[in-house]
Image (spheres, grey):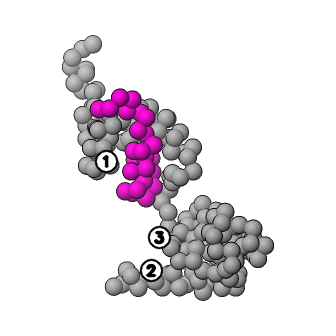
């Protein structure tokens, strides 16, 4: 190989620097520690958990940076991230709405509440509203069957919700968000 060509085409250090910048120092230091251990690829899930904890989701840039810094194929990183339900490949809304679809809630109208939420927000399960405020998720059971049907927004449990209450509930969170951004 011509040494002059390798100097102009080998951008490994530049790529590594860009990946480190994309993830931030705590994450790339953790990946460096993983690389120093036996079978560093076995730490991929732990690394992805840390990236998601810091950024809220795993963007294509994050996935590529992890692949480069860990030294594993990008397809493997993307495959792991898309296989496990816990990982999110898109940002979540400021407020995550969990509609309980357990037996008690379902029997008492949870599906109608979910339909109303989806209609009001213009999204379906797993999606985030266009304003970035709400993400819709369903829960198997929230453990508050006596309050059925239940909707949980963030850490707040709302019991005995009806479809007609949905617009006011959403407005309450929008006002709360505006109040915190204006303060």
- Between 33 and 168, the one lying in front of the other is 33
Dividing the image into 4 quarters, which one contains the N terminus? Answer: top left
According to the picture, the residue beneath numbered tag 3 turns out to be: 94
Residue lying farthest to the top in this orientation = 1
Q: How many C-alpha atoms fall within 10 Å of the one at disc 2: few (<14), some, or many (≥20)? A: some
Q: How many C-alpha atoms fall within 10 Å of the one at disc 1: few (<14), some, or many (≥20)? A: some
- Which element carries disc 2, helix, strand or loop? helix
According to the picture, the residue beneath numbered tag 2 turns out to be: 177
Image position of 153 with respect to 160: above or below? above
According to the picture, the residue beneath numbered tag 1 turns out to be: 27
- Which element carries disc 3, helix, strand or loop? loop
Q: Which residues are magenta?
A: 36-62
Q: How many C-alpha atoms fall within 10 Å of the one at disc 3: few (<14), some, or many (≥20)? A: some
Seen at 27% across and 50% down, the residue is 26
Q: Is residue 90 left or right of residue 169?
A: left
Q: Is residue 18 left or right of residue 88?
A: left
- Which element carries disc 1, helix, strand or loop? helix
Q: Position of residue 112 (x, y in %)?
A: 74, 74
């Amino acid at each position: 190989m011509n040494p002059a060509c390798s100097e102009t085409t080998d951008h490994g250090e530049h790529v590594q620097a860009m990946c480190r910048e994309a993830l931030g120092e705590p994450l790339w230091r953790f990946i460096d520690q993983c690389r120093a251990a036996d079978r560093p690829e076995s730490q991929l899930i732990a690394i992805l958990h840390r990236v998601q904890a810091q950024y809220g989701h795993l963007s294509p840039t994050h996935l590529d940076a992890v692949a480069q810094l860990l030294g594993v194929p990008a397809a493997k990183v993307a495959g792991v991230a898309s296989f496990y339900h816990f990982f999110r490949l898109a940002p979540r809304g400021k407020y995550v709405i969990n509609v309980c679809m357990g037996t008690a809630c379902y029997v008492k109208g949870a599906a109608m509440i979910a339909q109303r939420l989806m209609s009001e927000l213009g999204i379906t399960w797993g999606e985030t509203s266009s304003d970035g405020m709400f993400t819709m998720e369903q829960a198997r059971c929230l453990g508050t069957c006596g309050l059925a049907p239940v909707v949980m927004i963030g850490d707040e449990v709302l019991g005995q919700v009806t479809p007609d209450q949905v617009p006011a509930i959403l407005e309450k969170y929008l006002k709360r968000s505006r109040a915190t951004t204006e303060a």
